[in-house]
Structures are given as structure tokens and as C-alpha cells.
Amino acid sequence: MTDAASRSIRTIIADDERAARAHLASILACIPDVDVVGEVATGTDAVEVIERERPDLAFLDLEMPELDGLGVVRVVHKSRMPLVVFVTAHDAYAVRAFQLNAVDYLLKPVLPERVLQTIERVRARLASDVPVLEEETDRIKTTADELRPRAVNGYLRRIPVRERNDILIVGVEQIAAVVAASMICARFLLNLTTH
């Protein structure tokens, strides 16, 4: 048995939903060689824990306050970047996640059997003893930068738009109208126009 196979996989979980963090942590607690060394609610806290703890693996929610999962990848120093598994409720980000060389992409609610498959992939990557090349880390960070919405003169050129269970990235020039999705918002907009 190699050293990589015998040591525990030091892991952090970053998700702004407390229930989602607890659910994933409870699944990981059942896997003998996984050691959760940190649970945080924001991307900013994830960066701090990664820099301090130097985990082998980070489960990153793609939608967090302050800094999302892609932002964490952009900010963490490349020598400290762990293997990454993105976790989200939206499957629209899957291609982007794999462009960033993510080990896996888990959809919420996370299923125990999927987490086991993910940990098998992590074990394989760690056992391969192939270090992530500096150029590869730079490519990952460059891709993360390219995927974030761009602003021109303080205004976004692209915005994420929910369409049923998907998130689409739409150029603002393609938008003809915006319609409120709830009665509360509709009343609020109506009040704005009458005053």
C-alpha cells in the first residue's frame, strides 16, 4: 500500500447552506480515510481555511456569498490549491467545472453513492503521484477568470438567468424585457412606477 493510499484525505466543505454542509459532512464521516478539517459558509472563509489547513480536497458550492466556488479557485495561491469538487443545485455549470479540472461535479441533494464515487476519483488522483503542473494551475485560474461575468463601465455584459432548473448566461443585448417572478416583486415594481 502506498503512502498516498494509506493517509487520510484532508477535506474542507464550503457551502452557504448549513443543511447542505451538514448533509455532506455526515456522508463523509462514514468514509474511513476522509477527514473533514473545515466547514465554512462563504468563499472568503474557504480561501482562508485552504491557505491555513492545506487540505487535499475541497468541496465548493458554486453559489456562495462574497466569493463563489469559481472565485475561490481564482484566489487561492496555486501552490495551495487542493483537488476540487464543485457542488451545486444546477447542472448548467458542469462543463465549466470540468474546464477547471474539477475532480467531480455533484448535484444537490448529494447522494451518498455519488460521494463514494467522487472519493474513489480523488484517491486515484492522489495515488497517481502526478503533481499539478504550474502551467495547468495557471490554465485553471485563467479559465475561472474567463467564466465570471464581465462588467463594462460598471455594468455587466452577461448575466445568469434561471430557466426552470437551468442557469443560462445571457448577453444583456439579448434581453428585451424583464418580468417579475413573484407577486411581491410585481407589487414592488408597480409601486415604483406609480410614485
Image: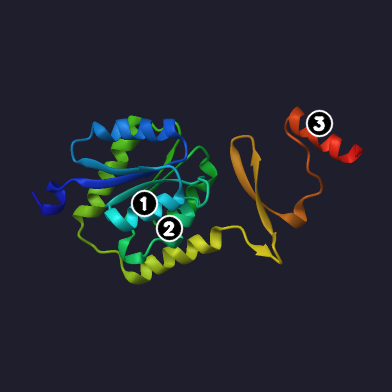
The image shows residue 11, relative to residue 29, as above or below, that is below
Please tell me which residue is depicted at 19% across the width and 53% down the height of the picture: 127
Q: Residue furthest bottom?
A: 135
For numbered disc 2, what is the local secondary structure?
A: helix
Please tell me which residue is depicted at 76% across the width and 36% down the height of the picture: 180
Badge 1: residue crowd in 10 Å (few <14, some 14–19, many ≥20): many
The CA distance from mark 2 to mark 3 is 39 Å
Please tell me which residue is depicted at 27% across the width and 53% down the height of the picture: 53
Q: Disc 2 or disc 1, which is closer to the eye?
A: 2
* Image coords of residue 84 (percent x, y): 36, 51
The CA distance from mark 2 to mark 1 is 9 Å
Instruction: State which quarter of the image contains the C terminus.
Output: top right
For numbered disc 3, what is the local secondary structure?
A: helix
The residue carrying mark 1 is 84
Q: Is residue 181 left or right of residue 24?
A: right
* Image coords of residue 1 (percent x, y): 8, 49
The residue carrying mark 3 is 187
In depth, the one of 115 and 60 nearer the eye is 60
Q: How is the image coloured?
A: rainbow
Compare marks 2 and 3 and give the one earlier in the sequence: 2
In depth, the one of 41 and 150 nearer the eye is 41
The quadrant holding residue 18 is top left
Q: Amino acid at mark 2?
A: Val
Q: Residue furthest left?
A: 1
Q: Residue furthest top?
A: 183
The residue carrying mark 2 is 73
Compare marks 1 and 3 and give the one earlier in the sequence: 1
Q: Amino acid at mark 1?
A: Val
Please tell me which residue is depicted at 23% across the width and 41% down the height of the picture: 34
